[in-house]
Amino acid sequence: MLFSTPLFLLLVPVVLSAPIQQWSVTTNLNNPNNQQDFLKDDHQVTSSTLNLVIHDDIQTYYENIVDEIISTRSEDVLMKLAHSMSNDESLESLLQPQAITLLDHPVQGTCLARMPGMIAQQLHRLHTKVLDAIEPAVDSLLKTYPLTITELDDGQPQPQQMQQNLVLLNNAMDQHVMQVLKQAHLEHKVALQLAVCENQLDATPPRRSLWLLLKNIWLNAAKTAKSSSNEKEQQDASPYNHDHDSLFVSSPSLLSSLLDTFADNLHLEFEGRLVDLYATLRSDVFDEEAVI
């Protein structure tokens, strides 16, 4: 009995404090201002989640198309180059005209054999460059063309604004990717690599004199071939002027044609698959809203 009274007195504050705390929590939830703050925070979380879903859908859409087109078309060209390396004659017939287009003179066999690797390296770098340009472009374009699904007074979704902004965003992305391709300068970069290769070989004494002699002979013959028609007929009889005109590529070069193919295919895919992107966005946005 001596300990019962103090123990009872110790328990009284605990028992009395429980209803007070419960009343305090209930009062906070029933406060209109607190309810508004709670709903506001919940709305911010929902909007942030939807923005991430939209951003990821769009970024994935463009990255998949870029990866598919550039990888597939590059592989076609690289396979062709690989087959040309099976023998010197095939390599010469396919790549020597390309080298002449880039450097205005023929390239000796060692550098010509390295040319497929140079082209493959530049295509890989271009592939990476275009893919890396997608995410920052999506970040910027979504600020200019926000993709939101507004609602009418009856609560039904109003997707027209989202459709319009998606078309504008797609056009802007198409222009952005085309600009990246224009700035690729594949021909210039491969030409520089070929020039470096030539300089390295020219620096080797045993091969320098013979190769420089052959290159100078070809250059002199090519210049002479562009003179008057009478002089051209005389040059045709020269042992050094052996059908050089057939080596020139009057049509666009291999790399130039490949860039045009990239641009045409990407443009068609961006436009042709836009309906699929819109369907994905609507599905993901509404599913996310239902979950939240």
Image (spheres, rainbow, N blue to C red):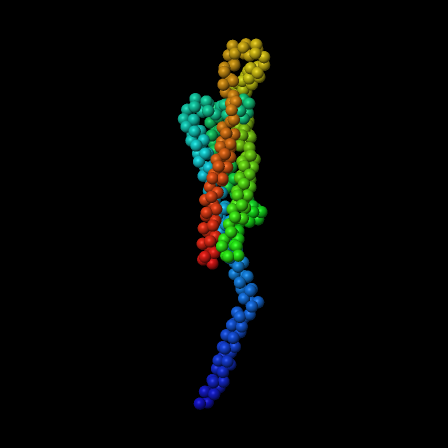
Q: Is residue 106 visible?
A: no
* Observer-nearest of 292 and 213: 292
Q: Is residue 55 above or below residue 83?
A: below
Q: Is residue 230 above or below residue 13?
A: above
Q: Residue at x 44, y 90 (%)?
A: 1
Q: Residue at x 48, y 25 (%)?
A: 95
Rendered location of residue 33, percent (x, y): 57, 67
- Dividing the picture into quadrants, the one containing residue 199 is top right
Q: Is residue 113 visible?
A: yes
Rendered location of residue 123, percent (x, y): 49, 35
Q: Residue at x 43, y 32 (%)?
A: 76
Q: Is residue 155 above or below residue 196?
A: below
Q: Residue at x 51, y 72 (%)?
A: 26
* Observer-nearest of 78 and 73: 73
* Observer-nearest of 30 and 197: 30
Rendered location of residue 47, percent (x, y): 52, 55
